[in-house]
Amino acid sequence: MTQFQVGDRVFGCSFFGAYSSRILIPEAQLRPIPAQLSTTQAASLPAVTLTALYALFLAGHFPMPSKLRNQGILIHSAAGGVGSMLVQLSKLLGLSPVVGVVGRTSKVEAAKSLGCDVVIDKSQQDLWEVALKAAPNGYSCVMDSNGVDTIEKSYAHLAMTGRLIVYGFHTNLPMGKDMLSPWEWIRMASKQQRMPKFDAMEMGSENKAVLAFNLSFFSEERDMLADFFGIVLDWIRDGKLNCPQVAQFEGLDSISGAHDLIQSGKSVGKLIIKL
């Protein structure tokens, strides 16, 4: 038995294999698309909202509000897919200040419109100088998907009891066409050698933590994902959470162009491939 019928509009997480014209997905990973959302809008939501919500869960701000004095959050790539959800959810959960980091001046207004109290344009400003000014006592959590380029200083800017949440390493890895170059793999090995090491005893004395995850490997965590998905749907239906900005590409032949846009650093929000 299933709750769905042929022709129903559904959305959810495939975890892998979504670049397909047909795909088989467990029912537990799907939900009916709310009436107020288009199929494109719905497609933009599950991966980024569940990633953002789980990151805030690890940071100690969800499902119960944190009682810690420090409520500041620093979000790298604040205008991206996960970043845009982290900004909105942080405001919804009452965190302050919500400080977003963007890599291009063209993304500043997008980050502000999402609700950032402070936007740091690292192409024009000293990232860490402005971050310290925005939160002189440090941050309760820093959301970092960059990897080697920022992870050490992200940790340094945590307040006592702060948590560095890592959910990506895009500055570590060769991407797209660059993967064919042996020099890029040499650079990757060099960057790996420069990855910071965190000493458990020092972390204990500083009362700081580093937590990392990859939502792609959560397929067995069905109860947790179901609860999170239900909460996200309620917030969407109540108008508390908006879809990320979407750039739509048509057909499987456009996948290369979509990846080129992501890797250029120019994209805002979420990219969708329409089959």
Image: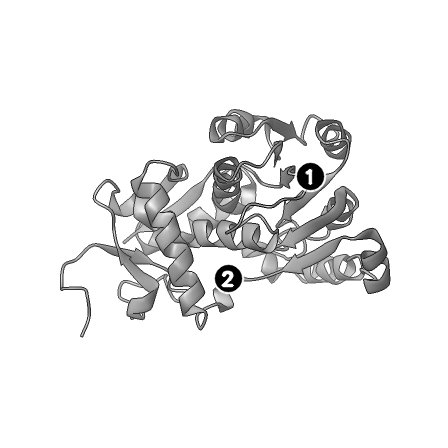
Identify the residue position indicated by label 1 in the image: 69
Please report the residue visible at 55 percent of the width from the left and 55 percent of the height from the top. Answer: 177
Identify the residue position indicated by label 2 in the image: 215
Q: Which of the two residues, 113 or 141, is positioned nearer the viewer here?
A: 141
- In the picture shown, does residue 43 fall above or below 23? above
**Residue 107 shown left or right of residue 255 in the figure:** right
Q: Which residue in the rendered view is the most extreme toward the left?
A: 6
Labels 2 & 1 near each other (Cβ < 8 A): no
**Residue 185 shown left or right of residue 205 in the figure:** left
Q: Regarding mark 2 in the picture, which secondary structure is present there? A: helix
Q: Regarding mark 1 in the picture, which secondary structure is present there? A: loop
Distance from disc 2 to disc 1, alpha carbons, whole Å, reads: 29 Å
Query: Comparing marks 2 and 1, which lies closer to the viewer?
Result: 1
Is residue 249 in view from this perspective? Answer: no
Residue 154, position as x, y percentages in the image: 73, 45
Please report the residue visible at 25 percent of the width from the left and 56 percent of the height from the top. Answer: 10
Render colour scheme: one colour
Amino acid type for the residue under numbered disc 2: Leu
- Give the number of the disc on residue 157: none
Could you tell me which quadrant the N terminus lies in?
bottom left
Q: How many numbered discs, if any?
A: 2
Please report the residue visible at 23 percent of the width from the left and 40 percent of the height from the top. Answer: 36
- In the picture shown, does residue 224 fall above or below 81? below
Q: Which of the two residues, 94 or 245, is positioned nearer the viewer here?
A: 94
Could you tell me which quadrant the C terminus lies in?
bottom left
Q: Which of the two residues, 164 or 253, is positioned nearer the viewer here?
A: 164
Residue 225, position as x, y percentages in the image: 42, 62
Residue 91, position as x, y percentages in the image: 51, 35
Amino acid type for the residue under numbered disc 1: Arg
The earlier-in-sequence mark between 2 and 1 is: 1
Residue 97, position as x, y percentages in the image: 62, 31
Query: Alpha-carbon neighbours of circle 1 within 10 Å: few (<14), some, or many (≥20)?
Result: few
